[in-house]
Image: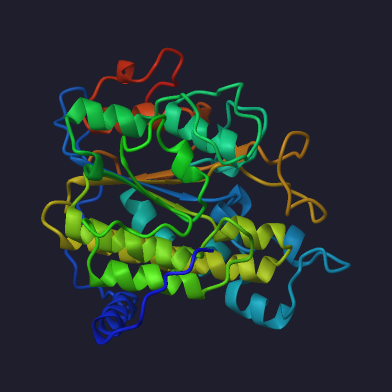
Amino acid sequence: MRSSGGQWGAARRAALLVVAAWLGVGSSAAAPSGAGPEGAGATRRTENVVLLTLDGVRVQEVFGGMDPVVAFARNRRSGIYDPDRARRLYWRDDADGRRRALWPYFWGTLAPQGVVLGDAGRGSRVTLRNPHAFSAPGYIELLTGRFHPDVTTNDARRYPHATVLQAIRKGLRLRPEEVAVFSTWDALGLFAASEPGAIFVNAGYERVPAALSNPVMDALGDYQEHVMALWEGYRTDMPTFHLALEYLRVHRPRVLYLALGETDDWAHARRYDRLLDCLRLDDDYMRILWETLQSIDAYRDRTTLIVTTDHGRGRRAKDWVDHGAGIAGSEDIWIAIVGPDTPGRGALGPSPTIYQADVAATMLELLGLPPDALPPGAGPPIRLP
């Protein structure tokens, strides 16, 4: 961590009170329209795209909530320290009840206004092109539209592969700060673009530059230095999320990529109870984000939200904490799309297999840009059944 060296003044304390108030964003924001126009002659209404990734979140929790395979595992393989508390909060007798207990806003409000892909029980599969099933290959596949054989480690380095974020900036003739990335993991700031300065990036313990910051972002920049994350190279998701939210309010980016990572941390630490708590918090983050978008004229009914992950995890009690080549289930992911051009159909299936690589061209299409804005070999836009 880098020390901020700053003093806490009255303005910054007041700014943090504002941040705290945001956690209680109410239901007074205008409701989004949900399903968009369908058919060959439909008019595209998306003008902005928000991409949200939740690192290493399995299909089991997204579609089934608290997983009985893990929750009732023996020999502390679940890592649940207080089973009574965890089951009271998240256990229900059926999968639909469990997923709604875990993600009440997502399944109660967001999903009915869009589509959710990857539910094997409905015959829907979303998977990877890359064979590695860990973070760097997944994020670069997601952002470039294809598997790159030179991405074989999680080392923090910049690759020569242009991303969809760069293609959007070029295609729409945007300023760098109009395409913004906020990431809990510092390395993702390098993966997001092939050239430094091509887009705006805030990752790890970076502070927002003074020219783009305000008292709230300054306060969050100080705050992040005082919260200890589980692993090196990561800050916690709370400052990442609220920095992104304040940046969105102030600078109105056309594209925002928000990459949260604590779900992967708690899974690797074998703390299933804390993973569930983190997923429940992510549901509230999705609520705050969507309600904020619907409260701003520039975004209301003009913004598509895409939520997905970089990889899956093992399916068994002994390997649900892990992922990678050879661990069955690591290749299984999911994608949710909510916006004015997406029909409100909820969890879909059966459907043809969709790939992580297809997200990049989908973002281009939503913004009215041609798929060939990406290099050859990129996946096609997602087509719904």
Residue found at the very far front of the displayed protein: 5
In this orientation, does residue 125 appear? no
Q: Position of residue 156 (x, y in %)?
A: 56, 41
- Given residues 269 and 292, the one toward you in this image is 269
Q: Quadrant of residue 170?
A: top left
Residue appearing at x 41%, y 61% in the figure: 240
Looking at the rendered image, the quarter that the N terminus falls into is bottom right
Residue 221, percent from left and from top = 38, 67
Vertical comparison of 4 with 24: above or below: above
Q: Is residue 199 visible?
A: yes
> Which corner quadrant holds the C terminus?
top left
Q: Is residue 234 left or right of residue 91?
A: left
Residue 337 vertical placement versus 19 (above, below): above
Q: Where is residue 340 drawn, in percent x and y?
A: 22, 44
Compared across the picture, whether 30 is left or right of 162 comes to left
Q: Say which of 269 and 75 sits in front.
A: 269
Q: Residue furthest bottom?
A: 10
